[in-house]
Amino acid sequence: MVVQPSRRAVLAGLAAAAASAGSALAERRALADMRGSFDASEGVRPRDGGDQSAALRDALVRAEATGRPVFMPPGRYEIADIDLTPTAKIVGIPGETRLVFRGGNYLLRAEGTKSCRLDGLILDGAGRALADGIDGLLHCSGLEAAIVEDCAITGSSASGVALAGCAGRVARSSIDSARVAGIRLVQSRGMAVTENDVSDCGDTGILIHRYDEGADDTIVRGNRVSRIRARSGGTGQFGNGINLAKANGVIVSDNRIDDCDFSAIRCFSSDDLQVTGNICTRSGETALYVEFAFEGAIVSGNLIDDAALGISFANLMDYGGRLGVCSGNLIRNMRGHTRLPNGGEPVGAGISAEADIAVTGNVVENAWIGLQLGWGPYLRDVSATGNVIRRTRIGIGVSVVEGAGPALISGNLISGAGKGAILGMRWAEAVTGDLARGGAERFPHLTVALNRAD
């Protein structure tokens, strides 16, 4: 038997539904008021599949006039070509408020304004093409403060976040599936990139770039970076987890970086660096690379496991790369086989250094060469002291090519070096007996003393 509801029951149900809808609206407005925000839901409608761009522009203008953030309740908003107001602030519910690029020139852009702040939003590029000259789903230039916090950014056909000439921060956000870079910072003025999760990007995880070498002062700390490809090819320009280019005064610390096609951390022509406390695993090439025209780099306390090569300080003669401290790092399982053809047997040095470098207190295990000091004539004022080197083919290889400069090798413990503890090298070829057991006096540029070889 089917029981028909009474007229009274129907009316009671309608009243309850209306009360519930009113309660939900009141709750959204109360949340907006609690955050001190303008509630965009009065004009911007989620989930209806329509273009919400004009409504969002209007909400931003009205909020700007009162100095309040725009609060966007949970839902899906299809938008495009949003120019942010001079001090725009958009607040959503993390994991629930999704701004989807519906196609056009760009998603969100701020150029020459004062500041912008995005908090708790999902920016979804849906893989749709951005216009030429638009570098990210959030594209900003020249801002005094560009702030992105607790956001998720996905599916960009370019970069996820692209900030040029900005100060500010990108924090506690996830960026994935960007075709170019997860986070792209150019000509920064003291940015902070902290506690983000960057993954599955086409060319770079986090890029800190300047057109001409100069002070950048960005801090990159506590991020997780994984599965970064070299979609654009090259010999190391792409495929890096964290990539510095001509950016001085940068701190890269306490990051976890895994599965990069080339380097976990690449520092190109950048001075006064501090690279400390990072964990780098499964790098396709040199895990931590300090190269070209650098001066002044501290590389300390990093853990590197499973790479072609470990840490490299390179390019003295051609580009003036010099001056660094390499201390307290743990490096293990260097395969020696790189993505690039080298024309010979694997090299796989745990640490290689060319000029004005102190290599001290490191532990290297399971590498083709533990320490590689110099390359041909590219050796000057390198000391290797107090290192522990285990299970290598060559413990320490040091250049004895004509023109090589001074090197001090002292107080190292070398265990299980199959071919020799300390060997003189002509580029990749070992040409001496074991200098740990005598014969170093034949090379006036070398001081070899107090090492233990087992």
Image (spheres, rainbow, N blue to C red):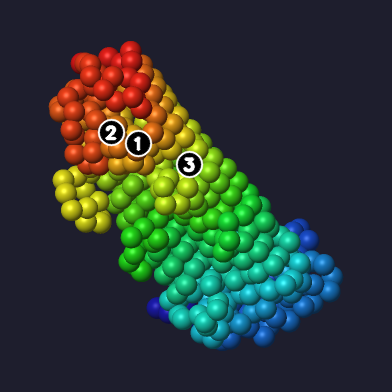
Q: Is residue 330 above or below residue 70?
A: above
Residue under the point 23% across and 28% down: 423
User: Could you say where residue 314 lies in the image, as x and y percent from the top left?
Assistant: 40, 45
Placement of the N terminus among the 4 image quadrants: bottom left
Q: How dense is the environment of label 2, judged by Cα within 10 Å: few (below 14), some, or many (20 and up)?
A: many
Q: Secondary structure at mark 2?
A: loop
Q: Residue at x 51, y 66 (%)?
A: 160
Q: Which residue is mark 3?
A: 322
Q: Name the residue beneath numbered marker 1.
A: 404
Q: Quadrant of the C terminus?
A: top left
Tell me where residue 194 appears, x and y as whole percent.
57, 48
Is the C-beta separation of discs 1 and 3 under 8 Å?
Answer: no
Please tell me which residue lies in front, 293 or 317. 317
Residue 141, image x and y in percent? 65, 69
Label 3, residues with CA under 10 Å away: few <14, some 14-19, many ≥20: many
Q: Nearest the camera: 218 or 192?
A: 218
In the rendered structure, the answer to whether residue 175 lies left or right of residue 250 reads left
Instruction: Report the label total.
Output: 3
Asked which secondary structure carries label 1, the reply is loop
Work out how far the residue at label 1 is from the one at label 3, CA to CA, in angstroms. 15 Å
**Viewer-nearest of discs 2 and 3:** 2
Q: Are marks 2 and 1 in contact (CB under 8 Å)?
A: yes
Q: Earlier in the sequence, mark 2 or mark 3?
A: 3
Name the kind of residue labelled 1 in the image: Ala
- Which residue is tagged 2? 400
Asked which quadrant contains residue 104, the reply is bottom right
Which quadrant would residue 394 be assigned to in this image? top left
Q: Name the amino acid, label 3.
A: Arg
